[in-house]
Image: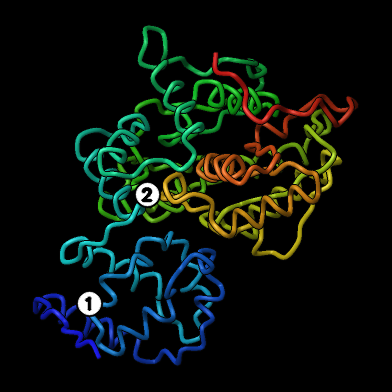
Amino acid sequence: MAVVTETRSPQEVLDAFEALKQECAICYQCGTCTSSCPSGRELYRGPRRIVRLILAGEVDAVLKSDDLWRCTECGTCTEVCRMDIDVAGVLHKLRQLERVHGGIRCAERAAADVATRHLGRRSRIDNLRFGAAMVSRGYVPKDKVGAAEMGVKLARRLLPGGKKRPAGEAPPADAVTLPFYAGCALPQGNELHAVVHEVAAGFGVRLDETTDAGCCGHPSRGAVPSLFETGERVFTACPACDASLAESGIEAVPLWGALAERAGRSSAISFAASGERFVPYVGCLADRDAALAALGDAAEQSGAAMVVDYPTLHNGCCGALGGMYRGATKSSARLLEFAAAQQAPVVTTCMLCLDNLRSAARELKHDVPVHFWPEFFRAVPAGEPAAVPTAPEERPDD
C-alpha cells in the first residue's frame, strides 16, 4: 500500500484554510451547489467536494484541483446554497492562494496568467498576442482551422487601414444615444463590430462607444480589477463584461434586451429574424433567466420559434476561457446535438460562447450554424415581413 505524504504548507496557507473551514462549517453536503453549477458536468470534484476537502483539512488536494480554475465565477453555487455560504467567494479565495502557493497546469489558469500579464502592460487584451502567448506555453487550440482563420483576420488588422471604425447603416437623425462598452473582443472583429452598430441603428439607437475603454478585468480572474471607469450606466454586448463591471460598481445593461424592449414600445419598428426557428444559448455568465427572457421576447416579436428543452441545456458552460484549448464540453456537445436534431441554428448573446460553440461544432462535425444575436435579429420598418434570408454562419471580413 502506497504511503501518501502531504507537503507541509506555509503557515499563511494553513491560516487561510482555517478561516475558510470556519466559513464553511455549517455546510451539510447537500450537493445543491454542484448540481446547479453550469460547469458541473466538466468538474472532477465540484464545489461540494472542494468544501468537503476544506473541512477535512486536505490542503494539498484542494490546491492541486484544476476545478478551481474551471469555475467561471458565475455565482450560482452561492445563490442556491441552503446555508447561505458564499461558495463562489470561497473558490475565489482558493484561486488567489493557488496563484501564489500552487502550480496547477491547466488552460484556464494559463489564460488568466497571460491576461494578467498583458493587462499589466496595456489596457486591453489583444487576441493575437494572447493566442501566441498561450501557444508558447504549450496550449494549442483544438480547433486549428478556426484558430487559423481568426489569426488571419486579426493579423489583417495590423496592416495599414486594418483597424476600421464601425460602418454600416447610419442611425436616424432622431436616434437615441446609448453609452456603449464594447469590451476587448468585439472591436477586434471589424465585420461583427460593424454589424452591432448597424443593427442598433435599425432600432433607432446610436452607440456612443468609448474607443479607449480599458478591459473589464474578467480574463485575469480577479488579479486585475476593471480598467474601465465611468459614473454612468453603460450598455454591453458581453455577459462577462456585465458581471465584471458590476463587481466594480458600474451599472451594465445587456444591449440586446434593451433593443428588444425598445422595439416592443415602438409602433414604427418590427423585429426580423433570419430564420423560422432557433435554439437559444445564454451561457453561464449571463443573468440566465433575464437573457432567456430577452431572447424569448425577440422570438415573439419576430415570429420565430425559440426551441427549448430542459433549462440547463441552454446555460451549461461552453468552456469559457479554456474552451478553445480543451475542446468541446459535455454541455456544448449536448446543446449542438439538440440543435442538430431540431435542424435549427443556435443563437447566443455572448461572443465568447459564439467562438467556443463554433469551434465545438467543427470539432464534433455538427452542421449547426451558430449566430451572435445581431447576426440573427434585426429591425425592419413596421409592416414589412418579419423574416429575412437566413444569415450565413460567418460573414467574410472586409
Locate residue 285 relative to residue 162 in the image: left or right.
right
The colouring scheme, among rainbow, by chain, secondary structure or one colour, is: rainbow
Locate residue 247 relative to residue 172 in the image: left or right.
left
Locate residue 68 relative to residue 29 in the image: left or right.
left
The kind of residue tagged 1 is Asp
- Compare residues 292 and 67 and report the one nearer the observer: 67
Q: Quadrant of the N terminus?
A: bottom left
The kind of residue tagged 2 is His
- Compare residues 370 and 84 and report the one nearer the observer: 370
Residue at numbered disc 2: 218
Please state the horizontal and vertical placement of residue 164, each as a whole percent of the image.
46, 14
Which mark is first along the chain, 1 or 2?
1
Q: Secondary structure at mark 1?
A: helix
Estimate how packed mark 1 is, as few (under 14), some (14 to 19) or many (20 or more) residues with alpha carbons within 10 Å.
some
- Please name the residue shown 35% across and 66% down the image: 68
Q: How many marks?
A: 2
In the rendered view, tell whether residue 225 sits above or below residue 160: below
- Compare residues 358 and 227 and report the one nearer the observer: 358
Locate residue 90 relative to residue 8 in the image: left or right.
right
- Please name the residue shown 46% across and 74% down the image: 78
Please state the horizontal and vertical placement of residue 204, each as a whole percent of the image.
68, 26
Give the numbered dot on residue 60. 1
- Measured Cα–Cα span from mark 2 to mark 1: 27 Å
Tag in front: 2 or 1: 1
- Please name the residue shown 57% across and 28% down the image: 177
Q: Quadrant of the C terminus?
A: top right
Location of residue 344 (image quadrant) = top right
Estimate how packed mark 2 is, as few (under 14), some (14 to 19) or many (20 or more) residues with alpha carbons within 10 Å.
many
Give the numbered dot on residue 86. none
